[in-house]
Amino acid sequence: MEEIAKIEEAVAYLKPRIGETPEIAIILGSGLGTLAEEVENAVRIPYAHIPHFAVSSAPGHEGNLVIGTLGGKKVCVLQGRFHYYEGHDISRVVFPVRVLRLLGIRNLLVTNAAGGVNRHYNAGDLMLIKDHISFFSENPLRGPNIDALGPRFNDMTAAYPEDLRQMAKAAAARIGLALQEGIYVYAKGPSFETPAEIRMVGLLGADAVGMSTVPEVITAHHDGMRVLGISCISNKAAGISDQPLSQEEVMETGARVRDRFVGLLKEIVKNWR
């Protein structure tokens, strides 16, 4: 079956269950899935029920599509994502984004847990993504282009639009939250990076490093969606701290920043135009 036919099959399954098109879709990263509990009048659809969706095996990715109201707006929340390191083909990693776009959703908020490359960052900081680096990974647009969704050659100059970032900064200021802003670099994983790799990406200008998000952003931008990205700095990256890296620390940090993270996302959604 061609990729567009798979996307259309998933859309046909979801449309009658979703009803009116949500204004914003939100993808929740490792340890950040608790935002879905804040969605009012929620309808939960397990990924396993949606045609051609994968089932996430990563810790902290519950695997539900949640539709309801948040901050006064109808939202579609992906409680967990798929990662390239889980063994999925890159087209399957970004499949949900394609489905969101064909459902008619034009706004995407992506979140993730990331290691802090910037030495001024601390575990628990929230970082607005200004730009990203992804030369070291397979591009999700490789292969035949789906002309109905976007162009063959996708301009990434404004992947994270300035007006959306300014809106997010204003939202953070209103609730008294300090918000970092920086460049995110994508690593395929699942191994954490070596100290030498962190020194290298730091020289390239990276402020945070993680194992997700960029394929989704490339695909969403290709498909004409407006994207805002936020990283939760879950730990200092390798070589910056003497502490060994672990998934447990990622989850612990996510739990610790829950209230601040949820408060920021609610404020952003409420003021998204």
Image (cartoon, rainbow, N blue to C red):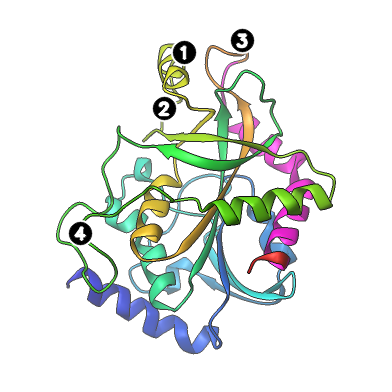
Label 4 environment density (alpha carbons within 10 Å; few <14, some 14–19, many ≥20): some
Q: Give the camera-side residue of 100 and 88.
A: 100
Identity, as a three-letter code, of the amino acid under mark 4 = Arg
Name the amino acid, label 2. Answer: Ser
Residue at 27% in and 46% down: 139
Write the start and end of the magenta stretch as one range.
244-270
Residue 12 figure quarter: bottom left
* Mark 3–mark 1 distance (CA, rounded to whole Å): 11 Å
Name the residue tied to disc 3. Answer: 242
Task: Tell me, yes or no, whether the highlighted magenta stretch contains residue 262.
Answer: yes
Residue at the (67%, 20%) spot, across then down: 120
- Closer-to-camera residue (260/41): 260
**CB-based contact (under 8 Å), mark 3 and mark 1:** no
Instruction: Give the label, 4 or 3, closer to the camera.
Output: 4
Examine the structure image and report whether residue 82 is included in the region drawn in magenta.
Answer: no
Circles 4 and 3, Cβ within 8 Å, touching? The answer is no
The answer to whether residue 230 is left or right of residue 58 is: right
Label 1 secondary element: helix
Residue 102: image location, x then y, percent? 38, 76
Gap in Å between the C-alphas at discs 4 and 3?
Answer: 45 Å
Element class at badge 4 = loop
Quarter of the image that includes the N terminus = bottom left
Residue matched to label 4: 152
202 on left or right of 182: left
Q: Nearer the viewer, mark 3 or mark 1?
A: 1
Q: Which residue is mark 1?
A: 195
